[in-house]
Image (cartoon, rainbow, N blue to C red):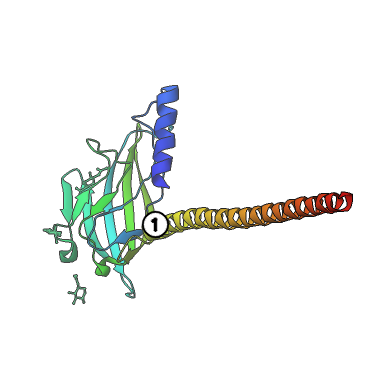
Amino acid sequence: MSTSHLLILSLLCSLFGYECHGACAEVDSDTEAVAGRGFKLGCISCKRRSEVDGRASIQWYFRPKGEADFFHIYTYNEDGPTIEHDQFLDRLDWNGSKRSNDIQDGSIYLLNVTFNDTGTYSCFFNRILFYANYEYNTVVTKVVHLSVVAKATRGTASIVSEVMMYVSIIGLQVWLLIEMIYCYRKISAAGEEALREAANAEYLAIASESKDNCAGVQVGE
Ligand SMILES: *[C@@H]1O[C@H](CO)[C@@H](O)[C@H](O)[C@H]1NC(C)=O
Ligand SMILES: *[C@@H]1O[C@H](CO)[C@@H](O)[C@H](O)[C@H]1NC(C)=O
Ligand SMILES: *[C@@H]1O[C@H](CO)[C@@H](O)[C@H](O)[C@H]1NC(C)=O
């Protein structure tokens, strides 16, 4: 779904020459990761056009499935990225806004997903807006409920449906072929029968005719 959103967005951009650098769409994160692969934890908080310049820092928290508390796993601020917890050591990369302090995309990328990564992720945008005479603090929170699967179930489902499609197409064609052969046989058998009958009838007719003739001849003699 997110891919199609991006497609539509880029299409609109190219069509109407929008200010695409400023374009921001709050696309929801995917929620199903495949064990052993990478996964992008999406978190986007768009600024409104009217809002003044600001500076944002991002905090990510994680609560493993079945546990009560969140713990801090990641920070991104003007000093750059910091991984805050051993479970995610060397496994988190920044996937958010680049070359900007006024971050609108705070997404991170989780490498080598394990089943232990199942749970709830929460990201905080701490944004300071710089007004002429004062600064204003805002906090935006987003939540991602992540489930980890052994294989991409959606992929499997689509493969299964594709195979089913081919099976049914081939099945239909085979059925059609069998039906055609059956009908052809039936028709040709009926045709032969008809021919034979016709031949018989003709033979009989000829025979009887010749008999008559013969009879006539015999009578005549
Ligand atoms: C991810 O897994 C691959 C293969 O198991 C391994 O080579 C790589 O070092 C792992 N990366 C991290 C960051 O753990
Ligand atoms: C997100 O991070 C991963 C791992 O570093 C990288 O392969 C991928 O290209 C990044 N994607 C974006 C959109 O930055
Ligand atoms: C998952 O968590 C369990 C219990 O904390 C631990 O024993 C196991 O090694 C972890 N697995 C991975 C792949 O980190």
- Image spot of residue 65 (x, y percent): 33, 71
Instruction: Examine the rendering and report whether any part of residue 47 can be seen.
Output: no
Q: 65 and 54: which one is in front?
A: 65
The residue drawn where x is 22% and y is 35% is 99
Say left or right for 199 vs 88: right
Query: In the rendered structure, which amino acid carries the disc numbered 1?
Result: Ile
The residue drawn where x is 38% and y is 43% is 3
- Most distant residue in the front direction: 221
Instruction: Examine the rendering and report whether any part of residue 182 can be seen.
Output: yes
Q: 191 and 198: which one is in front?
A: 198
- Most distant residue in the top direction: 17
Residue 163 image-quadrant placement: bottom left
The residue drawn where x is 47% and y is 54% is 170
The residue indicated by pointer 1 is 159
Q: Counting other residues with Cα less than 10 Å from the Cα at mark 1, is it few (<14), some (14-19), or many (20 or more)?
A: few
- Image spot of residue 36 (x, y percent): 22, 61
Rendered position, 153 above or below 81:
below
- Image spot of residue 179 (x, y percent): 58, 57
**Number of residue marks:** 1
Quadrant of picture, ligand 3: bottom left
Q: Which element is circle 1 on?
A: helix
The residue drawn where x is 29% and y is 43% is 56
Say left or right for 218 vs 1: right
Q: 104 and 139: which one is in front?
A: 104
**Mark 1 residue CB less than 8 A from any atom of ligand 1:** no
- Image spot of residue 214 (x, y percent): 81, 52
